[in-house]
Amino acid sequence: MSLLHRFRRPALSEAKSRALLVAARERVSPAIRELDTEFCYNIELAGALPGHAERVLTWLLAETFEPDGFGRQSFLETDGLVLEVGPRMSFTTAWSTNAVAVRHACGLTAIRRIERSRRYRLTVDRSLSDEEISGFLGLVHDRMTECRYPRPLESFATGVRPEAAFTIPVLAQGRAALERINREMGLAFDDWDLDYYTALFRDRVGRDPTNVECFDIAQSNSEHSRHWFFKGRLVVDGKEVPGHLLALVKGTLDANPTNSVIAFRDNSSAIRGYAVRTILPAGSNQPGPFRPADVEYHVIFTAETHNFPSGVAPFPGAETGSGGRIRDVHATGRGGLVRIGISIGPPKVELGERTVQEA
């Protein structure tokens, strides 16, 4: 089925467009004089949209305060070089899942999938070489999760037929079977993993795993950062040492616990704060007014350990990353309030506050 296309400009703010233009002129070619951008919404339908649906779809996709920046036709003139990049078709993005859910909630149940691509029009003094085009594309997309669209999308079909799943003969061959699939698929199982999963399927589950299960296990290990290592036995040069990794981390708390209000509660800790004057609901169990209150707020820090990106959620990175940071703040108990997230590379840091009387 052909796709419906809708366009919105710009895809980048004026400041980001200027920065990209400067980078393109410096790193790709000084022949690039101007840069314009737009989004293209590629919409797959299960059937015809009813009469009112077009208005609802426009309301959902258009910028509220710039309605003239949305339309059925591209805003980019064809006298320049137009390059388009977007998600690879082998995955449905998390953005698409959320967008479709919103549209279904608004009654647009005929929409099956929406993917958003970015289009760049380059005004150039001369034709760019293939190498220069590749250089510009390298500035604006992630090769792992995105690709160039040489022409407007007509379908989300990839034309690729998935391979059939097959079993790994652990019952017959034991650990050697897992070692082989580990090498062939690059699963990064270490000796502990190989021993554990051999025993799991052979002795406890009593069946052979599939290659899909092995791949999923490997991705889940990476996604959750091998948290079980934190309290595992430490063996150095063949000798077991006392304590574990988490004990080393908590050693600072044991040495000086005076300013700590909460420590190591689901990735979060709190240091003593200060009294503030604020407003709080008069009652937390029913609607009511906000009233002035004097409370003591403590500062919460949490470091998120999930890897970005992962095979489980490759497009925006591990989905539990930002959600995990929010969860960790709330996991300190009642009164945990998320304030700000700072993403400066792994680990990710979340700041929050916690009220004493609501704890």
Image (spheres, rainbow, N blue to C red):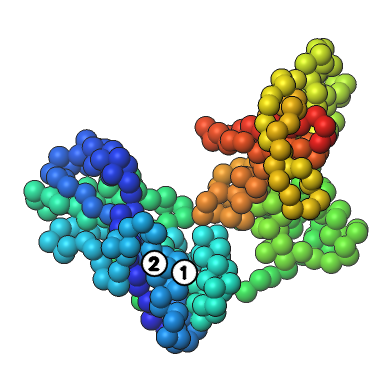
Which residue lies at the image location 55% right of the left edge and 33% below the top edge?
342
- Quadrant of the image containing the C terminus: top right
| Circle 2/circle 1 CB separation < 8 Å | yes
Q: Secondary structure at mark 1?
A: strand
Mark nearer the N terminus (2 vs 1): 2
Q: Which mark is residue 171?
A: none
Amino acid bearing label 2: Tyr
Is residue 24 toward the left or the right of residue 89 in the image? left
The residue beneath circle 1 is: 114
Q: Is residue 302 above or below residue 75?
A: above
> Which is nearer the eye, 115 or 352?
352
Residue drawn at x 22%, y 56% is 121
Where's the N terminus, which quadrant? bottom left
Can you say whether 208 is above or below 146 in the image?
below
Taking the image as drawn, is residue 171 in sight? Answer: yes
Horizontal side of 66 relative to 317 (left or right) equals left
How busy is the neighbourhood of tag 1: few (under 14 within 10 Å), some, or many (20 plus)?
A: many
Residue type at mark 1?
A: Ile
Residue ranking furthest to the right = 203
Mark 2, residues whose alpha carbon is within 10 Å: few (<14), some, or many (≥20)? some
In front here: 71 or 16? 71
Q: CA distance from mark 2 to mark 1?
A: 7 Å
Relative horizontal placement of residue 45, taking residue 118 as reference (left or right): right
| Residue nearer the viewer, 24 or 341 | 341
Residue 280 vertical position relative to residue 319 in the rendered view, above or below: above
Question: Where does label 2 land, which residue?
Answer: 41
Residue 194, horizontal then vertical, whole percent: 77, 48
Q: Secondary structure at mark 2?
A: strand
